Amino acid sequence: MCMCMYLFILHKHIIIHACSVEMLSIFFEVMDINMELEKLIISEQDYARLSKLRDSEILEDELSRAVLVPSDQVPANVVKMHSRVTYVDESNGATRDVDLVYPEEADSSAGKISVLSPVGSALLGLEVGQTIEWLFPNHQSRLLRVINVMHTT
């Protein structure tokens, strides 16, 4: 079994290189990191590109909670860029399928939502089954729950 793992803490971000998702889970357990409440799993590749969009306070807050992993180590059940996501809005029961994309790729009529949108920022890094309470621009709080993720890239 490969035991290679190293950790950097850089500007409130945790960057982890691990040989496998299993090793990453063991690390979180040993370090007592509660992924469901505190951290979001984001690929290093997505983080590098998203960091350039830091003009968004919402996105910056989300990225500050990120645990970075190599792109090939993002679990299949975690929302990443270009994922097809099915979520339910627990406040009204509405289910929606969306593709999470970069701002220049957004097209709401085609179900492509920008990572800079309130829903896009809320979904990034969540796992299937995970919920997040999110304040929308109309100052209404909604509880979103991810019910399916499909990585398209």
Image: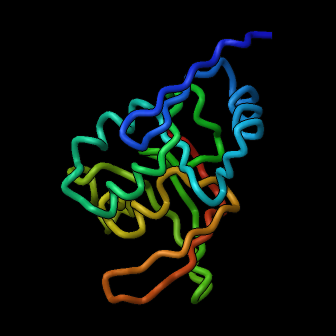
Query: Which residue sits at x=67%, y=46%?
Result: 33
Query: Which residue sits at x=70%, y=38%?
Result: 31
Q: Nearer the viewer, residue 66 or 106?
A: 66
Expressed as whole percent of the image width and height from the top left, the position of residue 141 reads 47, 85
Query: Which residue sits at x=62%, y=68%?
Result: 131
Examine the image and state in which quarter residue 5 appears.
top right
Expressed as whole percent of the image width and height from the top left, the position of residue 148 reads 64, 57
Query: Which residue sits at x=28%, y=42%?
Result: 51
The single residue placed furthest to the right in the displayed view is: 1
> From the viewer's perspective, is 43 left or right of 11?
right
Examine the image and state in which quarter residue 147 appears.
bottom right
Question: Is 122 located above or below residue 66 in the figure?
Answer: below
Q: Quadrant of the N terminus?
A: top right
Q: How many marks?
A: 0
Expressed as whole percent of the image width and height from the top left, the position of residue 79 reads 54, 50
Q: Nearer the viewer, residue 128 or 8?
A: 8
> From the viewer's perspective, is 19 left or right of 119?
right
Question: Is 68 located above or below residue 111 in the figure?
Answer: above
Question: Is 147 located above or below residue 21 in the figure?
Answer: below
Expressed as whole percent of the image width and height from the top left, the position of residue 103 reads 24, 54
